[in-house]
Image (cartoon, rainbow, N blue to C red):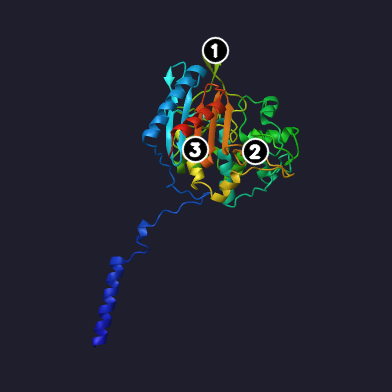
Amino acid sequence: MKKIILLSILVGVGVILMVVFGRTAHYTQNELPEQKKDTVLPIETSREVVVQMHQGANAKLVQKKMDSLLKRVHKRYDFHGAVLVAKGDKVLYKNQIGYADFRKKKLLHEKSAFQLASVSKQFTATSIMLLYEEGKIKLTDSVTQFFPDFPYKDVTIKHLLTHTAGLPNYFWVAEHKWDEKEPPTNLEMMSLLEQTNTNRFFSAGRNFDYSNTGYFVLASIVEKVSGLPYADFVQEYVFEPLGMKNSYIYSFKKDTIRQHQLKGYRLYRGWRHISIPGTVNDAIVGDKNVYGNVEDMYKWIYGLNNGLLVSERSLKMMYEKGQTKYGRKIPYGFGFRIDNRGDDKIYHYGKWNGFSTGLIQYPEQELVIIILEHTSYNAMTSLNSKIKKIVEENFNS
């Protein structure tokens, strides 16, 4: 009888425990997370880069000298742009000078968005590496695996990344073969290349020849594999995770002009700034047409270098010199120029429709210099050298 009573008590206690604590992995049934459809890549939302500034007397000295330098280049050389300098994992200097809109006399400010020109290629290369890491593509895949009618049959993704594909200049093709009123999109340009079969410069892998065509083709592959417009892919997998709130991709005549989006200018007769209109080549993305500000560009390069986007192995591949099929080294990795002479640097400059841009890294010194300008400034290399000298002479981290 006692055993029966004891058993009944144990069963009752068990039922009570199940009612009170009847949860699986600490959530009840109605707390189960909503199941979402598979996307191309897993998204982590906790990778946003927080910008921190250097403090102290040395930092203030650098900032003072940098302000003086910007005032000089603005006055003497018509520099209207923004500069950011980072040392280690903190920003040492950021500022802007000059006009955003000359007709309305509006000044540049922190959210002014510059066309990055060829600095945009870094985002295309990283998009390719994201798909590569997910096993969606191989670097040895040929373009014809994604676009069967592509007329250059031996071109691989790696050839495109390293500018060794020998493809014709799509600027020339668009300007001479495109008959429509609106500028062509990436897909339309891919079709135009297929239809015209313009002569290539050389067979794939034979030489190095800097190619905008290769990077628009890469962006087209990103679209084909991911099922997303290239602009949406970069927004979802690069800009948003890193907190790049002032960055986007703009396709001329296809997209709405954004708030704070700058125009490019040229100087007419030494005093008047004239805005530069878009061209038949300006709806193409992948080789250009990323817009952003200097702080977002810092978030970008910090995130890339610190494993927030791609693996260390992939980053190493991006930062290594490529080579021709004959084994000759070339001064380009994946989306970055590589210069091992003197102070090693990994960098890219850009120039398009009045915009002059530069992102320069000195890995051994943990120094990053970002320059964005929109009035056809022609002394980016010299300005970079002057900035680097100021930091070296006045700042010890």
Q: Which residue is mark 2?
A: 331
Tell me the crowding category of disc 2: few under 14, some 14 to 19, or many 20 or more residues within 10 angstroms, Cα based.
some
Q: Position of residue 91 (x, y in %)?
A: 43, 36
Q: Earlier in the sequence, mark 1 or mark 3?
A: 1
Q: Residue at x 60, y 34 (%)?
A: 287
Residue 18 visible from this viewpoint: yes
- Residue 302 in the image, given as x and y percentages of width and height: 48, 41
Nearer to the camera, 37 or 68: 68
Q: Which residue is label 1 attached to?
A: 270
Instruction: Using the numbered discs, state the Cα–Cα distance from disc 3 to disc 2 in whole angstroms.
Output: 20 Å
Q: Of marks 1 and 2, which one's residue comes earlier in the chain?
A: 1
Tell me which residue sits at (54%, 22%) in the image.
377
State left or right for residue 373 relative to residue 137: left
| Residue named by callout 3 | 367
Give how far apart the Cα atoms at labels 1 and 3 are: 35 Å
Q: Please, what secondary structure does the residue beneath circle 1 have? A: loop
Amino acid type of the residue tagged 3 in the rendering = Leu
* Badge 2 amino acid: Pro
Label 1 packing within 10 angstroms: few (<14), some (14-19), many (20+): few
Tell me the kind of residue under disc 1: Gly
Which dot marks residue 73?
A: none
